[in-house]
Amino acid sequence: MTLIGDLVEILGPDRVLSEPLERYLYGTDGGVARGEVIVVVLPETASEVSDVVIAAKRHGSPIVPRGAGTGLAGGAAPAVPSVVVSLTNMKNIEIDLGNRTAWVGPGVINLDLSKLTRSSGFHFAPDPSSQSACTIGGNVANNSGGPHCLAEGTTTSHVLAVEIVTADGEIVLLGGPAPDPIGLDLRSVVVGSEGLLGIITRTLVKLTPNPLDVRTILAGFATMEDAVATSSGIVARGVVPAALEIMDQKMTRAVENFVGAGFPTDAAAILLAEVAGHPAAVEAEARLVEQVANENHVTSLRVAADGVERAKLWLGRKSAFGAVAQLAPDYYLHDTVVPRTQLVATMQKIYEIAERHDVLMLNVFHAGDGNLHPLVAFDASVEGQLDIVHAAMEEVARVCIEAGGALSGEHGIGLEKRDLMPLLYNEADLDAQARLREAFDPDGLFNPQKVLPAGSRCADLGRPLPTGAWL
Amino acid sequence: MTIAAVFASYVRPAVADSGLPECDLMVAPQTIDELEHILDLASEHQLKAVIWGGGTHQGIGGRIDPDLLIATSQLNRLIDWQPEDFTVTVEAGMRVSDLEEMLADRGQMAVLPELPGAATIGGVMAAGVSGWRRARYGPTRDRVLEVDLVTGDGRRVRAGGRVVKNVTGFDLPRLAVGSYGSLGVIAQACLKLWPEPSTKVTVSVADGDRALATAYRPTAVVESDGVAKVYLGGTEAEVDGQVEALDGTVVPGWSWEPEPTGVVGWSLRVPPASTRSAIERLPSGWRYQAGLGVGEIKAASVDAEGAAELRAWAESQGGALVIVSGPAGLYSDMDPWGTPPPGLDLQRELIRRFDPCRVVNPGRLPGGI
């Protein structure tokens, strides 16, 4: 029987999509990469996922798992013709308020979980800007962050257990509801593994108590340096706010024009700071934010008067990437990280790179944790444009790594940053990563040719694996 | 050439007097390069090695009759501290107490176990143990940003990075936490730091569960043999406001109780909501310290009577009852971990690729791997 025939037998004809348009639509994510899709399947249970894996393996077809496809690094765009397993139909949620946890299917939309638990006083802390569209399965696979990960940590700090289907089609539960599960913590490497180690079919996530009080402060500055100095100054005074976000003027203007959030468009940079928690702490921390902003020559300062105004400010921040569509049809971004102390110098170098390559660069970033999002708006239909963008962005990555940083803070490596990995890691480091991958998926069935550049697994390193039985 | 001669250049006089167990061959590398060489040689000669930090968690896991003991005591340097970035990079043999003391000078903390004794950073990481402040700051695993491992066959491997947020590659730093050396020896790590709160208090209360429900995200609520203490940190106004609602006896600062000690030490882990039920199920005479809202209970007893039933119950809740210390005979009567977790084949495959000759702590992990 053909692969598609086998898949139809497992899922029925309605959940196997093989028309050219359907295959085309699933060939990309939110980024610029596009790949070839053999067929798309929409399983609804872990055992269906397992059957699909076994069938695809029998036919020698690689598998690319995906959620909503909001990723920007090409993680869900097949690098080789693949079966795409869309997990968006797996939307089960079981809430356990006593333990402050929830079992969620990979297809549950991030914001839907927080909406569901809001009246009980809890939320799911990771809040990527795409949270109204992205799925929790995708968040877990990419270890997604978001503005509020500054104080609460990225997705990995909120995952207690994952159920995966392995490359053998086995359904395995890693981790559990109790602290410190015994044995190697495989859960922790599945989080952020970008679909290379297994297909996530269920996750036990932590729920975080909603803050008793929140204050959101919008500050404008005449220079980027002042904005960054304010952000770093707040953290240096021993306060870790809920969020610290900066936008440059180009981005602020694009956003303001798009959603009218009330951002000061005359400022060279704006800082969106949020403090949250116990009312007394919020009061004191808000005063500190204002004080540090004043010390750094703040030009305008506004505190959101109520929930509506706060929501509007956040809508502005989270619409940043969408707002770029007004300027050019395509955009390309990195989400490199640098030590907080290197922010100003790095930003300066990044602007220089943009100028030298004559590209339209906008910046919005998680200043509190040094996670940059240098973004180039461009038109991919103009021949040679993408090459220029790639060249500029490779330089950006180099500058960030030279500053002691990392390639990705929350978006993942995928296809887009794969070949930059040797900038950060040597042969032995990459070999270790490849060994880890090989232990889970020796044939490279899951999301092949992602994250690790070709040749990462180096046969010359270390001692040969013993053959036959061990232990 | 004898094995002793092979390792002769790494045997250090300082090792002899630091309270180590009996082992014919004891070495203390002074650099990570030396550690690489030692593990390469150990692989070549098919030796079984135990790694020794402060020796505070050696009672956990399967017993080993080692050919070689590798002490990390000389790998104790500060590599890099960036106070404004809230990161610190240290060699694994540095003591937790030394690190926290150094950090406190600048109002920072690594939020590792509160009364660490002689424990080292590498030991705390390898054993995957956390302090009570995990209730607010997350477990030790949340602290590790970068790790340098020397694999069982002597290759230095770095993963993660010295930034507070990073998804570049698979998360080996987190995996190393609780790995008991099975992937290699943790040689160096970069940790994420937290600012020390400006005001800290400890409030003794009559009812720990009530306090947990009243306080807003306390630093910790710990109950020791029926007496509960709430640990609060934050701005003065925030702490004062919380104290009022708790109605207890307040002392300034965080005052931690020593862990219960006995012939046998245990770590009982249950889902947070089952903590009270777990305390009630402790066999009579067991002393305990429980992290309310966390589900971790440290206990001590004179023997293992009633432990099998308690373990069966804990496992039925998705938890575990682990032996932390005890007489040698106990480990042959009772599995130190209990029922192994799912995914053992994956664990074996992984270990095989990092420590192919199975040199470091063989048999220490659940399932005897």
Image: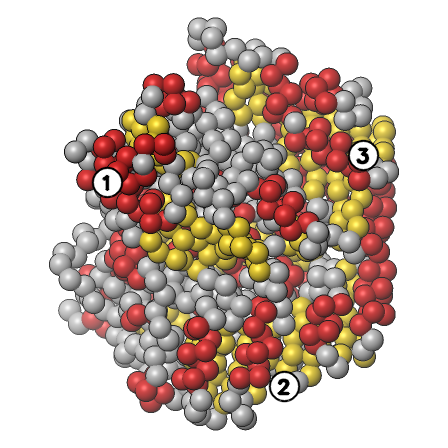
Q: Is residue B26 above or below residue A54?
A: below
Above/below status of A180 relative to B191: below
Residue B210 vertical placement versus B333 (above, below): above
Secondary structure of the residue carrying tag 3 is helix
Q: CA distance from mark 3 to mark 1?
A: 52 Å
Q: Which residue is mark 1?
A: A55
Looking at the picture, how far across and down is residue B120, in whole percent?
A: 50, 68
Which image quadrant for residue B246?
bottom right
Residue B215 in picture, x, y percent from top left = 75, 66
Of the numbered discs 3 and 1, the one sitting upstream in the chain is 1
The subunit carrying tag 3 is A
Tag in front: 3 or 2:
3
Q: Residue at x 65, y 61 (%)?
A: B136
Q: Residue at x 38, y 75 (%)?
A: B337
Please provide percent x and percent y for residue A236.
72, 47
Of marks 3 and 1, the one in the foreground: 1
Q: Residue type at mark 3?
A: Glu
Which of the chains bears the disc numbered 2?
B
- What amino acid type should be assigned to the residue bearing mark 1? Ala
Q: Which residue is at the front of the view, A410 or B95?
A: A410
Chain identity of mark 1: A
Q: In the image, what residue type sits under mark 2?
A: Asp
Q: Which element type, helix, strand or loop, lies under badge 2?
A: loop
For mark 3, what is the residue? A309
Gap between marks 3 and 2 measured at Cα? 49 Å
Q: Residue A250's image quarter?
A: top right
According to the picture, the residue beneath numbered tag 2 turns out to be B225
Mark 1 vs mark 2, CA separation in Å: 56 Å
Q: Nearer the viewer, residue A443 or B75?
A: A443
